[in-house]
Image: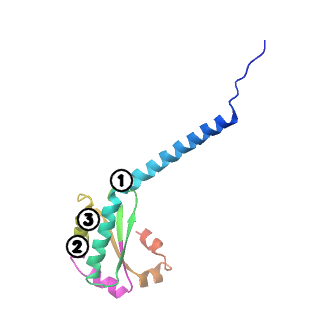
Amino acid sequence: TGVQTCALPIWVLAWLLTAVVLLLLLRGLTLIGSAYDWKRWPAIRRARVGIREVARQRIPNAEVVSLQRATEINPRRLSFCIMTSTDEDRDLLCQNPQIYVQFRDALARAGYPTRTAPVVHFIIESQETVDRDYGGSWVQCTRMP
């Protein structure tokens, strides 16, 4: 009497391994997708355009970028950076007492959840300051508290 072994052909093992890897990748993409909530992107894009229009009423060359961090986990994890060329332009925007209200109104008009609009962050900074204080790195500038 001999011991009988059951060996799977190598191609079956390869298919099983491929299936497991694909399932893990899909699960990872699902987690990333839920953390960043792709459904909010159109509203964020519309808000960026609206905020740029508000800023350009005062500073014609102002630019706006959005900084999205895990908006599904917490929709408050959204910031907009309004970029100007000079410190003088930045100060002109910052001195307007209604500018942040107008930015939040643009965010609400774009369809972003209104309950979170009051806590979305707006950073107004100039290229001059970024060059002088952050070695030209907007990433470093926006990471600072």
Q: Is residue 85 within the magenta segment?
A: yes
Kind of residue indicated by mark 2: Gln
Question: Of the residues under marks 2 and 1, which one precedes in the sequence?
Answer: 1
User: Circle 2 is placed at which residue position?
Assistant: 102
Q: Which residue is mark 3?
A: 110
Query: Residue 111's x, y, as percent?
Result: 25, 61
Residue at point 28%, 85% (across, down): 92
| Separation of residues labelled 3 and 2 (CA atoms) | 12 Å
Residue 122 in percent (x, y) is at: 32, 70
Q: CA distance from mark 3 to mark 1?
A: 17 Å
Mark 3 vs mark 1: in front: 3
SS at badge 2: helix
Q: Residue 32 in the image: state x and y as whole percent.
A: 45, 52
Residue 101: image location, x then y, percent: 22, 71
- The kind of residue on which mark 1 rests is Glu
- In depth, the one of 60 and 99 nearer the eye is 60
Element carrying mark 1: loop
Query: How busy is the neighbourhood of tag 2: few (under 14 within 10 Å), some, or many (20 plus)?
Result: some
Front residue of 90 and 47: 47
Judge left or right: residue 41 versus residue 23.
left
- State the CA–CA distance, disc 2 to disc 1: 24 Å
Decide: few, some or many residues near mark 1? Use Cα within 10 Å; few <14, some 14-19, many ≥20. Answer: some
Earlier in the chain: of badge 3 and badge 1, it is: 1
Q: Which residue range is magenta in the image?
A: 81-100
| Residue highlighted by disc 1 | 72
Q: Quadrant of the N terminus?
A: top right
